Image (cartoon, helix red, strand yellow):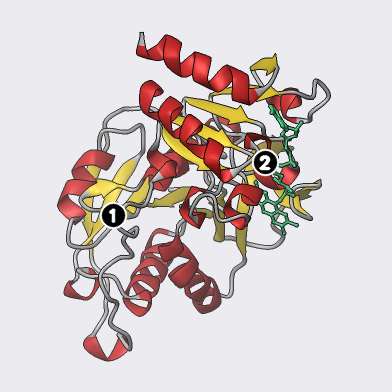
Amino acid sequence: MDILIVLEDNNGKIHRMGLESIAAAQQMAGDLGLTTGALVMGAHGDALAEEASGFNIGEVLKVNSEYVASYSSDGYAEAVKQVIEQENPNYVIFGHTYQVRDYAPKVSAKLMKPFLVDNVAVRSNNGKPVFTKLMFNGKLFSDVHANGDGPFLISFQSAAFSSDKAESGSADVRDCSVNIDASMIRTESESPFQEEAGGVDLTSANIIVAIGRGIGKEENVPLAQDLAKAIGGELASSRPVVDAGWLPSAHQVGSSGQSVSPKMYLALGISGAIQHVVGMKGSKNIVAINKDSEAPIFEIADYGVVGDVLEIIPKLTEALNE
Ligand SMILES: Cc1cc2nc3c(=O)[nH]c(=O)nc-3n(C[C@H](O)[C@H](O)[C@H](O)COP(=O)(O)OP(=O)(O)OC[C@H]3O[C@@H](n4cnc5c(N)ncnc54)[C@H](O)[C@@H]3O)c2cc1C
């Protein structure tokens, strides 16, 4: 295979970043005439393999080893390295996850091959992929391509590709052996990070109601909470709202917060600074309300309303509740 997609386990389901990686690999394969395959491992390997076999992927490889039953960076890095050596793909796509940040650089070091991280797009140029990366907090785009021989390790930013675009199909599952022993595993990982009680998972929300400094003061935040409840969405914010202590940091969207791609993103009193936009521009529909008609958020909004959020939000909530 030419492109190997490494899929991550999310409690027995393919992690959403894995679905985005499948969409990315399928686009690369279509543009460049390449073949694809996916790699699964871990305690839920069978379930992941079955789910992966429902996508338009050449084949699914399932690693069977007691040393990857639970996650360790040593075990995963060694297993992925050995599969790469066996299968010889030219590109290996990883999801944009904390686990990948933990072990994929080790794979890169073991193979002495580059890891091109955090790309936002890929296109074909003379039969070779060219990756696009944001620089200086999204102020500049740079084109990146790999020199020399593969395999090249690649990751795309969250929401660079839509998980909905992963084409379904039918793939065979093949068992795959790796040679790992206990002496190679030097660390034992604790159970995966869980969001604090009452925390929000913005990354899987379909509708997000996000507030910015334009909400005015902490006492106005419940207006947006009511709207989020009425519309069935999650409440999010720009950074000044978190810095002011009006919402916990788990609600922050942007370059130093979460990256989200809901079906609808309501930006209420948010100017559209690049550090915010990089975290939400993958949203399918962006609705912006801002009293300044020149606010940059309108450049990326699908629908824009020039007006006062403090007047509009309560009316919107009332209309939805009716
Ligand atoms: C290293 C770094 C990392 C950063 N990371 C992030 C990040 O992760 N996320 C993030 O969001 N920011 C981040 N920032 C901050 C970012 O640069 C902006 O300052 C921030 O996004 C602005 O937030 P805002 O749009 O809420 O506020 P402002 O830029 O102050 O905009 C407020 C908007 O509300 C409008 N408004 C005011 N009153 C009303 C009203 N009554 N009705 C309607 N509209 C109204 C105004 O016209 C204005 O457009 C970062 C900055 C740096 C330097």
Residue under pointer 2: 213
Residue visible at 36% across and 52% down in the picture = 199
Q: Is residue 265 visible?
A: yes
304, 285: nearer the viewer: 304
Residue visible at 47% across and 53% down in the picture = 250
Relative horizontal placement of residue 272, taking residue 252 as reference (left or right) = right
Q: Is residue 159 visible?
A: no
Numbered disc 1: secondary structure: strand
Relative horizontal placement of residue 69, taking residue 291 as reference (left or right) = left
Q: Mark 1 or mark 2, which has the lower sequence index?
A: 1
| Residue 242 rendering spot, x and y as whole percentages | 58, 53
Rendered-image quarter of ligand 1: top right
Amino acid carrying mark 2 in the image = Arg
Residue under pointer 1: 9
User: Within 8 Å of ligand 1, the CB of disc 2?
Assistant: yes
Tell me: residue 149, above or below residue 186: above
Marks 1/2: CA–CA distance:
37 Å
Residue 129 figure quarter = top right
Count of numbered circles on the image: 2
| Residue 89 rendering spot, x and y as whole percentages | 47, 55
| Residue 18 rendering spot, x and y as whole percentages | 39, 46
